[in-house]
Amino acid sequence: MQRQINTIKKTLAIRQKLADMIQAARKINPYAKLTIQDVSKKGVMSISVTELNADQAKAIGLSGLIMGLDASGVKLAIGDFATGVYRSTTDPSGHHSTPLLR
């Protein structure tokens, strides 16, 4: 997993997309906060964003939205962002596959 995270961090296009997502969310609501919750084996980030409704969360680039409230009653959207960076797997010979970038 660490190899996948490092590849994501080093990929300029992904970093730029995340920066654009943060900027778009804060343009809609300056109090919006984005948090990366998880990264799947297929490279899909689960991102939570506070203070945005479903239409706004979709507008900043999240898909597969789940809406709700956090423990303190703040609006919360959880959605997906596909990075295209797959987690390396080990084949039976012990060799690691190379993460794929899309």
Image (cartoon, rainbow, N blue to C red):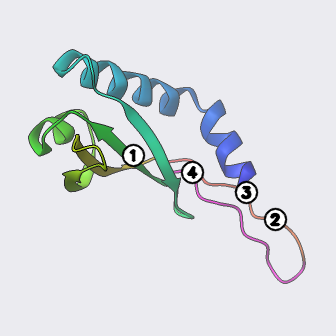
Classify the position of the N terminus by image quarter: bottom right
The residue carrying mark 2 is 96
Real-space CA distance between mark 1 and mark 2, rounded to the nearest whole angstrom? 28 Å
Which of the marked residues, 4 or 3, is nearer the chain's N terminus? 4
Q: Which three-letter amino acid code belongs to the residue tagged 3?
A: Thr
x, y percent for residue 58: 18, 42
Marks 4 and 3, how far apart at CA? 10 Å
- Asked if the residues shown at circle 4 and circle 3 are in contact, with their CB atoms under 8 angstroms apart, the answer is no
Amino acid type, residue under disc 2 in the picture: His
47 horizontally vs 57: left or right:
right
Mark 2: few/some/many CA within 10 Å (<14, 14-19, 20+):
few
Look at the image and give the residue range highlighted in magenta: 84-93
Residue found 27% across the figure and 21% down from its top: 31
Circle nearer the viewer, 1 or 2: 1
Q: Residue at x 49, y 34 (%)?
A: 14
Image point 70% across, 40% down: which residue? 6
Where is residue 44? Give x, y as percent.
Answer: 45, 55
Q: Quick one: label 1 or label 4, which is nearer the N terminus?
A: 1
Q: Which dot marks residue 26?
A: none
SS for dot 3: loop
Label 3, on which residue?
98
Q: Which residue is mark 1?
A: 47
Picture quadrant of residue 66: bottom left
Q: Secondary structure at mark 2?
A: loop
